[in-house]
Image (cartoon, rainbow, N blue to C red):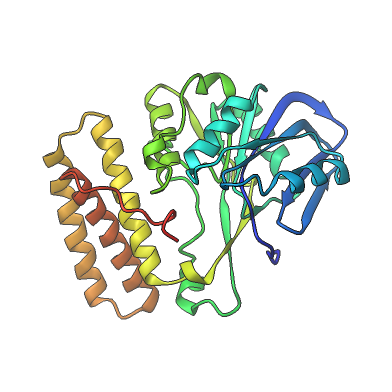
Amino acid sequence: MPKLKGDGFCSRVRELTSTSASALFVVRVYGRRCCRSRGRRGPSFRVIVADNDDEPSAQAIAHRAEHELDLRITYVHAPARNISIARNACLETSTADLVAFIDDDEIAPPQWLACLVDHQRQSNADVVFGPVKAVYEPNAPAWVVEGDFHSSQPVVRASGAIETGYSGNALMRRAVIGDRRFGLALGKTGGEDTFFFAELFKAGARLDYCEAALVYETTPLARANLDWLVRRAFRSGQTHARVLRANGVWPLAIAAPAAAKSLYSVLVAATAFDGVKWRRSWIRAALHAGVLAKAFGVSDLRIYGAR
């Protein structure tokens, strides 16, 4: 497992072409450091860097990386500190058949990009997600590490369908995106990617999962605690309720099962003696409470923009 260091600076997207090349480069750019991974073969690509800082603070870094690593990098300044603006800037700039998103605080192994592209070609899926494996600080609480609450993979329904996902590790066919963009209203609260992919699914896109396309993401100590996890779960529940409402589900039909599930999770947490189990149940209770709150119109909780 890699040790992650450095200060990330922007939201990134890999824009791929459908042709092969002799080498695959995956770059992870930091404020003062660049990391390069090189694979034996893979798709040719360019990197689009969308910097959503108020000032173009990443421009010099991106230009330096372009020359030092012999990469095609397009820098886009997308200020306003709204992640949806940065993601949309990447979509507006991209022209290739395939577009892959990776977050600025993630590191990808050399085979990451090739795995996503190969899986998309074999499955003919419109969107392919890969897992995000959390890397914890040495002094992170033991229950956080044991429970691995910060790692991500898409939810697969009993039918095998994936109905939404995340942009931290995703490959999309540009044609299926069309004029669709990430919602600005969710750009500071989070959940903009969940809603975006749910809308793609509703429009008929097929979402798939490639376990081999793994990336790693460092977990700051400020997020390795129950309070942050509960707040994130609550906001995730609000996003889920937003998706249900967009699909035409009535508020009462959303609220009733959410209330029951939240109460059940609280009871499980109250009777569990295992440190990981009771905390996981408490977080689940917060998730369903968020669904319940949004069903009655409570404003989205802002957790990322407030950090």
- The residue drawn where x is 69% and y is 63% is 6
Query: In this orientation, which residue lies closer to the viewer: 141 or 257?
Result: 141
Residue 252 position, x and y percent, is: 11, 41
Q: Is residue 47 above or below residue 8?
A: above
Q: Quadrant of the C terminus?
A: bottom left
Is 100 on the left or on the right of 201, as rendered? right
Q: Hey, which residue is sitting farthest front in the picture?
A: 55
Quadrant position of the N terminus in the picture: bottom right
Using the image as rendered, state which of residue 243 and residue 148 is in the foreground.
243
How far from the left and from the top, in percent, is residue 264?
19, 62
Relative height, residue 140 to residue 290 (above, below): below
- In the figure, 217 relative to 59: above or below? below
List x then y, in percent, for residue 102.
Answer: 61, 44
What residue is at 15 percent from the left and 54 percent from the top? 259
Residue at x 15%, y 39% (from the top left corner): 251
Q: Is residue 163 visible?
A: no
Q: Position of residue 153 (x, y in %)?
A: 50, 49
Please identify the quarter of the rendering in which residue 93 is found.
top right
Say if 297 sits above or below 287 in the image: above
